Amino acid sequence: MRMVLDKRLLIWVNALLLAVLAGCSTVAPPSEPPVVIPPVVEVPQRPPRLGLALGGGAARGFAHVGVIQVLEANGIRPDVVTGTSAGSLVAALYASGKRSAELERVAMGMDEALLTDWTMPLASRGLLRGEALARYVRQAVDGKLIEQMALPLGILATDLANGSGVLFRRGDTAQAVRASSAVPGVFNPVSIAGRDYVDGGLVAPVPVRQAREMGAEVVLAIDISADPQDIPANGLFSLLPKTTAIMGQSINRLELARADVVVRPSLAGVGSADFASRQRSIEAGRAAMLAALPRLKQLLARLRPAELH
């Protein structure tokens, strides 16, 4: 009887052991969570923001049109544009949406008489009022305010009371251009919001720093200022430009040192009132920009956002 019980007990233990082993074989052992490798996402690299700074120089400003023609032909469009004096006029026309061909038509058709409104010298602070210039600009930009331009626009003038530079980025485009172009002794100062303004070239003949203030990471500066040695000093109308050029030399050197690319059209012999040489000035602007184009393209291609300051 005892042997029968032992056999039954052994059979039961064996059956239990087999059941346990069979159960274990159906349970998967715990495993490590799968490692998920995130996909590589390439962050698109944008080109650095390009600022175009157009300098002052009266009728020599036609050279700016040639510069813009070369930029446009090579698919280079500035992100911001700043201007001083004559540069402010071209900057305003360009920022309003005018293409280079239209800018040339405007330049070639510009009537000097339309911009001239003489004053009574004893009753004013300049030979010209400047109202004719403002009317011309207002019509040329279709009455657009500065903040309504197709390109961000900055127009530099000088506060006559304290000598500080003021960059107009909002408001009446025509009045801002008139203020930026108000060469002391030639144009009357321009009153805006109770303050008098004169030529922006007194603080920055080429507004490079102002372009950077507007977000430009690369600045292309166009210097059309005259060399004092090329200006005779044999009368009132030649003495004033010569004096202005001498005073602006040091300021200009300091300002242009902040630019990444400086373009200086060859304008020797072209005077500040030489409207007759407008075609030569445009061609000089084209030639100078073509010479500087490889450097600008190289700079724009090399720089990346991480490298910009």
Image (cartoon, rainbow, N blue to C red):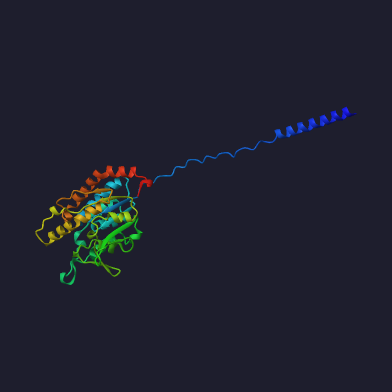
In depth, the one of 212 and 18 nearer the eye is 18
Where is residue 138? Give x, y as percent: 29, 62
The residue lying furthest to the right in this view is 1
The residue lying furthest to the front in this view is 2
> Is residue 93 visible to the viewer in this orientation of the structure?
no
Q: Is residue 13 above or below residue 168?
A: above
Residue 253 in the figure: left or right of residue 40: left
In depth, the one of 210 and 173 nearer the eye is 210
Residue 283 in the figure: left or right of residue 305: left
In depth, the one of 91 and 247 nearer the eye is 247
Where is residue 211? Give x, y as percent: 31, 54
Q: Quadrant of the N terminus?
A: top right
Quadrant in the rendering for residue 86: bottom left
Quadrant in the rendering for residue 203: bottom left
Residue at horizontal 31 percent and vertical 52 percent from the top? 51
Residue at horizontal 16 percent and vertical 69 percent from the top? 121
Total count of labels: 0
Where is residue 280? Give x, y as percent: 18, 49
Residue at horizontal 28 percent and vertical 64 percent from the top? 175
In depth, the one of 11 and 209 nearer the eye is 11
> Is residue 206 visible to the viewer in this orientation of the structure?
yes
The residue lying furthest to the bottom in this view is 123
Quadrant in the rendering for residue 126: bottom left
Where is residue 158? Give x, y as percent: 25, 63
